[in-house]
Amino acid sequence: MNEQHNAFQQFLGQIKKTREFIHIEENIFVQLQEPKKIMEVSIPVKMDNGTIKVFKGFRAQFNGARGPFKGGIRFHPQVTHDEVKALAAWMTFKTAVVNIPLGGSKGGVIVDPKELSNRELEELSRGYIRAIHQIIGPNQDVPAPDVNTDPRIMGWMMDEYEKIAGQHAPGVITGKALSIGGSQARSYATAQGGAYVLDEAVKKMGLSKGCSVAVQGFGNAGAHMAKILYKMGYKIVAVSDSRGTAVNCTGMDPEEVEKHKEKTGSVANYAGAEKIIGAHCFEQDVDILIPAALENSITKDNVRIIKAKLIIELANGPVTAEADEILEKNGVLVVPDILANAGGVTVSYFEQAQNAQSYYWPEKEVLNKLEGVMRKSFDEIWDLKEKHHTDMRTAAYILSIGRVAQAMRDRGWV
């Protein structure tokens, strides 16, 4: 059984656990165990050497009871059918957690984009949209950036869709550049939303603003999170990426670490770090750990090295079910991904709203709206956690599955 399949089984375990706390009819429950649709496509790309290479891609649409499907597109060599299905399921309940009128979907292409030229990458991006254009649209399914995709790629994809549609349709894609209908704050919205819920968790736990933080995965979301928290007064003592870890117990400036990574390709060997050989980000004696890389990062095999009191899941599915149980027994508060990283999809929803109105909000207004959504959602989940004497993840599913189930009832899907 591979990790991606485990991720979907983990999701199924969560919705099953939720039935202990809220009533979900069997006719609804069975519908929440499979996606509405999964499309698998082949994308031929003419490479720079003149040969044709065929890439495999996917688009999964899980549940649209609350609104149009919504979910990112990732370019990664380990993308699979089961991974995309699990991520689409999580997105369904992520949008419900923050109470925005969207469903959940996800897309991906099996590719290492670092091995492609810019022209090949553009051809692949446009080819993917040509392959799935019939099942996406501003009122049908709205993709966004994910792992290894960015505003430039979203711009190519939107442009290709508009060529096929024969009209402007900026709302078909979110996470675009500002010049073509993107939203202020979208580039760092996932991290900013995570920072708001982290701040709420710190208050509930009685931790200080100056407490220590480790960030595993110093990519787009992780780097932004480190910089935001540093400005808020938190002490960033460890950051890591796929090539190494930088640690300094007195704290580091993430801006300087980012400059080093831009020059060298990794946080490893950062001049402002201590000389520690082989230390993992998870091992550090910190108050807060932020997994911001890929799913299944924290497992039963490494969970016991974690010393943090609070975990903020900025990545999707970074903690396996077995590790989750151990963390709960050890008294570690885990703020789940479907809340912690929902800032990205929330501002994507704001972008859709702005596209529909052709009226764009200033950055301050976007951030004010995002803060209100994230802090309110945290409080709702915390109250459910206290009411049912359970963990934050289960409370988040109680809230979100309840909302999705109600939409299904009101549509007559019972």
Image (cartoon, grey):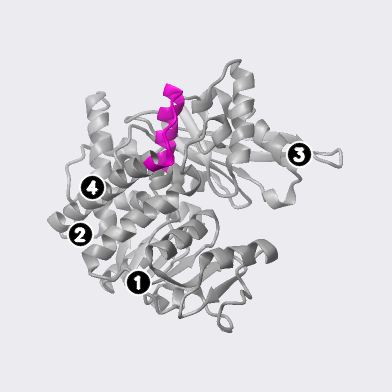
- Circle 2 is placed at which residue position? 390
Give the label on residue 210, or none.
1
Asked whether residue 166 is in view, the answer is yes
- Circle 4 is placed at which residue position? 398
- Circle 3 is placed at which residue position? 119
What kind of residue is marked 3?
Answer: Arg
Q: Identify the mark nearer the N-term, 1 or 2.
A: 1
What kind of residue is marked 2?
Answer: Thr
Residue 347 forms part of the magenta stretch: yes
Q: Position of residue 393 (x, y in %)?
A: 29, 55
| Circle 2 or circle 3, nearest the eye | 3
Q: CA distance from mark 2 to mark 3?
A: 51 Å
What is the chief secondary structure element of the magenta stretch?
helix
Question: Secondary structure beneath disc 4?
Answer: helix
What kind of residue is marked 1?
Answer: Gly
| Circle 4 or circle 1, nearest the eye | 1
Q: Position of residue 6 (x, y in %)?
A: 44, 55
Q: Position of residue 213 (x, y in %)?
A: 41, 70
